[in-house]
């Protein structure tokens, strides 16, 4: 594997999950793979889990890590070609990516959707700018359209908590005060498409995800109906794709104990950060069926599997 931009960059997701579970048992077994190699982690947005777990994964593989909060510390970058750079942008991605490629062996990038225009966000200019001009492998730490490291960690967590070949997984929208990207939901759906799980997406009308990503997935507008017999409830807010960037705080969609009781004692999942009692009630988040802390732990092994494959330059 050279770059990790989408979950489909993994040749075999089931094998990657197995390998991650092995790495979890012996995290420092491959400490020589990354010896004298450097990863640069570039953040255009805030992070807790992605920053620390990717750093931890690289350390477990013996790599050196350089972290840069690009939005605060870097020059403002221009991503369009052929522009007259006489405004606020000081440096073009063309130079920046080539320069970074001389200092690092892998570059990982976080750059969220701006949620102003789907046409612009779908171009995923930041990660694609790095892909175009960097001469080293590029890893997606949440781009405008996807968060595949999260989806891989979620797949690992689900595998660890079910014996079923076809568990019922529900991706449920939940309310939020801010307009949030669709990236986490997109990658979760892309990941589910690659597994044998049966899944349902539930959200209010008008909150459909990009139909190219959901393809022929089942969509159920009645959240309570969707929850029936579920083994996993994966919760995420996303702003509207069709009415791009519009949000909703409709509290009838909040995750409550009463709703969880409709399920097959389902496990509760969320990528974090989560707003308590807005997205989900304390009683659910603090209950015995929550997997959120385990999910965050698996971010390390998801990243470690990906970095290991890149370091080994496994052919697709
Ligand atoms: C981000 C999002 O929804 O994409 C990051 C989640 C991993 N969440 C927030 O900004 C709260
Ligand atoms: N889940 C996740 O990506 O968390 P951070 O935004 O804290 O990295």
Image (cartoon, grey):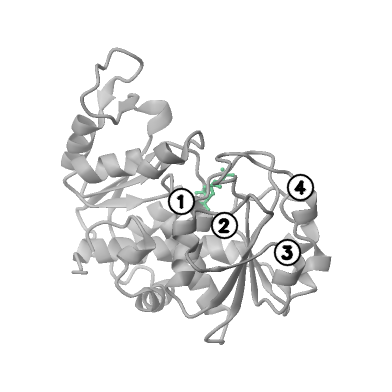
Residue 299: horizontal and vertical position, in percent?
A: 47, 61
Instruction: From this view, report whether residue 57 is shown above or below residue 273.
Output: below
The reply to whether the residue tagged 1 has its Cβ within 8 angstroms of ligand 2 is yes
Q: CA distance from mark 2 to mark 4?
A: 20 Å
Residue 22: horizontal and vertical position, in percent?
A: 39, 77
Quadrant assignment, res 245 = top right
Residue 82 located left or right of residue 24: left
Q: Nearer the viewer, mark 4 or mark 1?
A: 4
The reply to whether the residue tagged 2 has its Cβ within 8 angstroms of ligand 2 is yes
Residue identified by numbered label 3: 223
* Discs 2, 3 touching: Cβ within 8 Å: no
Residue identified by numbered label 1: 50
Sooner in the amino-acid sequence: mark 1 or mark 2: 1
- Nearer-the-camera pick, 286 or 84: 84
* Discs 4, 3 touching: Cβ within 8 Å: no
Residue identified by numbered label 4: 250
Q: Nearer the viewer, mark 3 or mark 1?
A: 3
Instruction: From this view, report whether residue 288 is shown above or below residue 239.
Output: below
Sooner in the amino-acid sequence: mark 4 or mark 3: 3
Q: CA distance from mark 1 to mark 2?
A: 10 Å
Residue identified by numbered label 2: 271
Q: CA distance from mark 2 to mark 3?
A: 20 Å
The quadrant in which the N terminus is found is bottom left
* Discs 4, 1 touching: Cβ within 8 Å: no
């Amino acid at each position: 594997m050279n770059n990790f931009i989408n979950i489909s960059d993994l040749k075999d997701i089931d094998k990657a999950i197995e390998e991650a579970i092995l790495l979890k048992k012996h995290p420092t077994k491959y400490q020589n793979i990354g010896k004298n190699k450097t990863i640069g982690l570039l953040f255009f947005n805030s992070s807790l889990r992605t920053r620390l777990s990717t750093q931890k994964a690289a350390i477990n593989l013996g790599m050196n890590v350089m972290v840069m909060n690009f939005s605060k510390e870097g020059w403002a970058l221009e991503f369009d070609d052929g522009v007259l750079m006489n405004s606020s942008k000081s440096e073009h991605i063309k130079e920046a990516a080539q320069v970074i490629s001389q200092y690092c062996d892998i570059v990982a990038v976080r750059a969220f959707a701006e949620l102003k225009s789907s046409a612009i966000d779908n171009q995923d200019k930041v990660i694609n700018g790095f892909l175009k001009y960097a001469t080293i492998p590029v890893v997606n730490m949440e781009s405008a359209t996807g968060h595949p490291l999260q989806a891989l960690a979620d797949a690992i967590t689900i595998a660890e908590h079910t014996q079923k070949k076809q568990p019922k997984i529900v991706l449920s929208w939940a309310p939020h005060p801010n307009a949030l990207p669709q990236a986490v939901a997109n990658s979760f759906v892309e990941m589910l498409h690659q597994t044998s799980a049966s899944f349902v997406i539930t959200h209010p009308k008008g909150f459909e995800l990009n139909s190219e990503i959901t393809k022929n997935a089942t969509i159920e507008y009645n959240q309570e109906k969707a929850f029936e017999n579920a083994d996993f409830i994966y919760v995420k807010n996303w702003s509207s794709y069709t009415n791009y960037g519009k949000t909703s705080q409709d509290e009838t969609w909040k995750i409550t104990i009463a709703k969880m009781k409709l399920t097959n004692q389902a496990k509760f999942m969320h990528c974090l950060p989560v707003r308590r009692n807005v997205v989900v009630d304390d009683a659910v988040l603090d209950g015995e069926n929550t997997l959120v802390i385990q999910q965050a732990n698996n971010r390390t092994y998801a990243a470690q599997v990906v970095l290991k494959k890149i370091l080994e330059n496994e052919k697709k």
